[in-house]
Amino acid sequence: MAEKSVAIVGAGPAGLIAARKLQALTPFKFTIFEKSTRVGGLWDRESFIHPKMMTNFCRFTATFSDFAWESVDLGRPAPVYPQAWMVEKYLQGYGRLIPDECYEFQTCVTRTEREGEGWKISSTKDGVEKTRYFDYLVVATGYLQHPKELRCEIEPSIKTNPLFPVPILHSTKYRTLEQIVPFNESSNDVQRTVLVIGGSHSGADIASLIAHQASDARWGPNGNQAFRGVKVIHVGMNVLLPIPGMVWNKAATHVSMHPLEFTLCERSTREAEPLTFAFTPASIQENQVLLFYYKEIIEGGVGDLDFMEKLPANVALGDRYYQCIQDGRIQLIRGVVKGLEKGQNSETITARVNGKDGQDVVIHNITAVINATGFNSGGGLSFLADDVKEQLEFDPANTRLPAVLNASYMAQNSNVREIALLGFVPVNWGIIEMQMRAVVNRWTGRPFDEDAEHIAALGDHMRYIQAAIRDEKRKEEVPQFLFGDYLGLMEQAARELRMEQIYGKNGDFNGLFCSSRFVGPGESKSEALKTMYAIHHLQEDIDRRNPLLAYVAFTGLLGRWRSKSPADTADTCAEAVYEVEAHPRYPTAPGYDLEHVIVLKDGDGKEKSRLVARYTEVTYEISLWAVDTSKGPCETGPLLFKVPIDRDSNGEVTAPFGTISYHVDFRGSRLDGFRVTVEKGLAIEQTFVFERLCEQVIADAALVGLKGEDSSVAEKLGVQADENGVVNDALPTAP
């Protein structure tokens, strides 16, 4: 029998998975066509994701079963939530496991069409066209390749004038603050307002990135103290619930925090019987379940919100966004941007936002606009011939679900088995591995038990969702995650593919579900065992000493805090501090993951001193450092002391003026307050109890627009406005 060949289009995560499964499980030859100069796809430093952006998923779910993070040299252990540059380095290491001769870089596939039972692939490189023939085709270009344009009306004088002073950028083009803030002496004292349009992950990620960069521009070592900062206004249509990466572990007998996936992907949260992948349209009932989880786990039962909203609630995953919303650095507005027009002066834009009740709120003085409305996933299939698209039931107008992929766990259409589209339905890496295993089994004739009735039902459901996406009146049926039953899909796939589970200390119905938990016939276990060991090691560490409390306390410190301590007395050994402000900046020394500038103020708001706080995930430690004012207003000086937090949320350190003991209070997954006591000898000299100033309850901010009929439009949108619904500079300004 002649040797089979496979063309793989794309060298991002999906393309690399395809190559590795073919390499391990088949004798097939394969060629990877990649238009850029290296592997990485979306995670390439020159692609769409900012290198310093943190992932929305932890490293245990952003991993391949045959390549552990422990096998990557980052110069340090991988954090629980890696930054994008770390993911790029991980993918580069994975790509090196594939022989160099299998890659064709700087090669663009221009057309693919059927040729008998195989494929005719046309490509160009350096202007030279080439045609080759393959037996099978894997499309791994991904669904995040073609950014959408803004759908709102834009005044022609803005749209057609390349010199118009207000930049309008897609989120994929944004990298530095200088693109939207002109740093010069005359602009330092001007408050900048950035409008971010798009109420899902893209919008949340870019809004928090801008807020962080703006804080760094003022509070970094070379920061400009005259810079008034950036006010970020984030507008989205659906209810948006910001969820941090580290959340309260309700099952623990003490206050405990763990990665979000340790709850969402924990097998024991489902019934103790074999799972089958479930798929349903969005519903009010699902919204209520999501809100209940949010109120209980994230907010600790805060608020009394009646949630009968028809539109599906969206979630925004990530600690930065959650903290920036709580801190007021990002103002979240519920609505749809209908138009952009010239502002009250020649250097700003005015936006018209259509609120939940159809009434407009006007936002003035916008100095930059970021389009974060997402991507057209169908654009990644432009090179397919029309007859192939027809077999895939391709819908060019459907930007979220352009094809019906009802077989091989949403990687193939049951009508055409010689082509696979990996990752075109938004899924994580573990499911893409399952998809390619199923494809390999189909192409090699290995035993495979995918249920025919389930395939037919999934196809019907996909067509139903496609129709709902096309119909503006059926938005309430379309969930944020079109197919969100990760546990059901992983378990069904593992069962039908006859895979072995690596249990570790888990049983059939408990433990974290991730790609490394399952190993198929013919696959090596060594790398999967490394990942499973790392998961168990972290879980044991959480149970024993709860190290992630320090992380949640550190990230939660952002914002302004006021002490309820009594007035100063002459015999106190340390001056009373009444206000604390924490401002984030990028770490200024290697080995640290997070860094804040801490400003200490008296009761009149007068600054008394500054500190630098640092956090490292290598040892899960917080440390406080002096500021060396001889070098600059925010330059880090000598280490003062480390700040341990034990499993009971307590700690104690020795300072030059005495002993400092402290207790940290959490409510749900957030820092609720902290108490500091200064002792000299055996006497308690001063106790400070800090509460957040101008606290914004996250659930109330996220659910703006769900209040009673008698509320004003401005209240419903969570903003301040005049009697005409006009928002000027009344929005809260970040400290």
Image: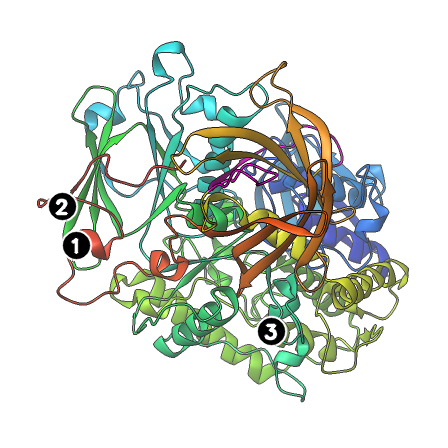
Q: Please state the horizontal and vertical placement of residue 181, each as a whole percent of the image.
A: 40, 22
The local crowd at label 1, few if under 14, some if 14 to 19, many if 20 or more residues have their Cα within 10 Å, is: many
Say what amino acid the circle numbered 1 marks. Answer: Val
Q: Please state the horizontal and vertical placement of residue 10, each as a whole percent of the image.
A: 65, 44
The vertical placement of 386 against 257, above or below, is above
Tell me the residue at 34%/37% (across/down).
Answer: 733
The vertical placement of 348 against 371, above or below, is above
Q: Please state the horizontal and vertical placement of residue 551, each as a whole percent of the image.
A: 65, 51
The answer to whether residue 384 is left or right of residue 132 is left
Q: Which residue is mark 3?
A: 250
Q: Which residue is mark 2?
A: 725
Q: Quadrant of the C terminus?
A: top left
Which region shows up in magenta? Answer: 568-591
Q: Earlier in the sequence, mark 1 or mark 2?
A: 1
Q: Which residue is mark 1?
A: 713
Tell me the residue at 50%/80% (across/down).
Answer: 457
Residue 180 in view (yes/no) = yes
Q: Which SS class for mark 3?
A: loop
Kindly report the distance in space between the C-alpha atoms of the residues bearing marks 1 and 2: 7 Å
Q: Quadrant of the N terminus?
A: bottom right
Kindly report the distance in space between the C-alpha atoms of the residues bearing marks 3 and 1: 37 Å
Dominant secondary structure of the residues highlighted in magenta in the image:
loop
Say what amino acid the circle numbered 3 marks. Answer: Lys
Tell me the residue at 84%/54% (across/down).
Answer: 23
